[in-house]
Amino acid sequence: MTWGKITDETLAAAAELIGVPLRRDRMQWIETATRDAIRHFAWGIGDNNPLWFDPEYAAKSPIGTIAAPPCILYAVDSTIVAPKLAGVQWIYAGTEWTWYDHIRMDDSFRVEAKLSRQEVKTGRRFGQWALQIGDIDYYRQDGRLIASAVGKCARTPRGDGSGRREGEDASGHVAHRYAPAELADIEEQVLSEPRQGAEPLCWEDVAVGDTVPAVVKGPLTITDILAWYAAAQGALHYGGVHGDALRYRRRHDDYHINKETGAKDSAGRGHLEASTGRDVGMGGAYDVGPQRISWAQHMLTNWIGDHGFLHKLNVDVRLPNMVGDTIWWRGTVTGKRQDGGVSLLDLNVEARNQLDVLSANGTATVALPSRQHGAIPLPLDPA
């Protein structure tokens, strides 16, 4: 029996799909960036930028209308490309985003996706596992390529929950107990996050080594995770609900057995239920990878303001972010360059938790207006 196992046979069956266009209806929560969809996504990541909400404010911006947080495209297509390997857990490992233009209110999208490669790996924790990497292209209603994503999913055997104490996560530390002063300081940081807003940040005013003001998220609650599902996913990736879920699990042979009832259920409930999170090897209830990556986008769009443009964001998810953890997203400018009249900054970005443990990291590229070259010439050329 190969269900729930990673074998040469199951890996070969998955590899047969490399380069094949994939059906994506199960990965799509919205088709159009309506005003409601934009507002709900921004609420779901805790981003109260008026550019996403206020029509009068947005009309005065360079975009000219309500815009969407760039990572709303997770709601258009989840970037999860993890075919075959029935019964094998998938863990979101990261996204390489490239955007070519702003996403404006009422933009609609067509998606093309494929499995681009599959890497077989070995490790102490899981033995043999696979990294499945997919390419996703987002086309606007006018046919223009608006963004591309490379989504990464680790496929690992599901654990039995043994070997960890109650509250212990995959990195080995026990749930953090905050002192009252520590919580008060976190709350103050959350409520005082700076935003560049309508005042232009010019390329000439930023130097290599400059830091990006942090965005703080936490302590993480189950409600925060539910808000992400409401904004970006619903129950789509886990087979839906009721009869639709049964039909999905029969068709794909992908489920997790609820130990209390013996019924087939979604392993995705590990994001919301500590016992299942431990059972799938994550140590307890934990956040959703694209949710954490979207917080990095929140930090960067705060910093560059309404006149800037987030061009690239490449983040690897390193460890689970457990319920109760607090994340600080920070960035540092590593380079300045001009490319075809576009004034660009390159950055390193990273997320660390309350114990200063690295949770996620990567790179970003932003375009800024320039006193010499003027406004950003959008859309950028996909070539």
Image (cartoon, rainbow, N blue to C red):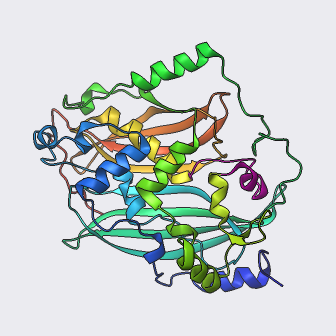
User: Which residue is depicted at the point 85% across and 55% down?
Assistant: 124
Q: Is residue 283 magenta?
A: yes
Describe residue 91's horizontal placement relative to residue 365 as left or right: right
Residues 205 and 91: in front is: 91
Residue 301, can we see it? Answer: yes
Q: Position of residue 92 (x, y in %)?
A: 60, 58
Segment tinted magenta in the rendering: 273-288
Describe residue 11's horizontal placement relative to residue 195 as left or right: right
Displayed quadrant of residue 247: bottom right
User: Which residue is depicted at the point 38% across and 38% down?
Assistant: 300
- 145 relative to 184, above or below: below
In the rendered image, the residue lying farthest to the top is 181
- 272 relative to 62, above or below: below
Q: Position of residue 102 (x, y in %)?
A: 24, 53
Residues 338 and 107: in front is: 107
- 302 relative to 338, above or below: above
User: Which residue is depicted at the point 47% across and 70% down?
Assistant: 27
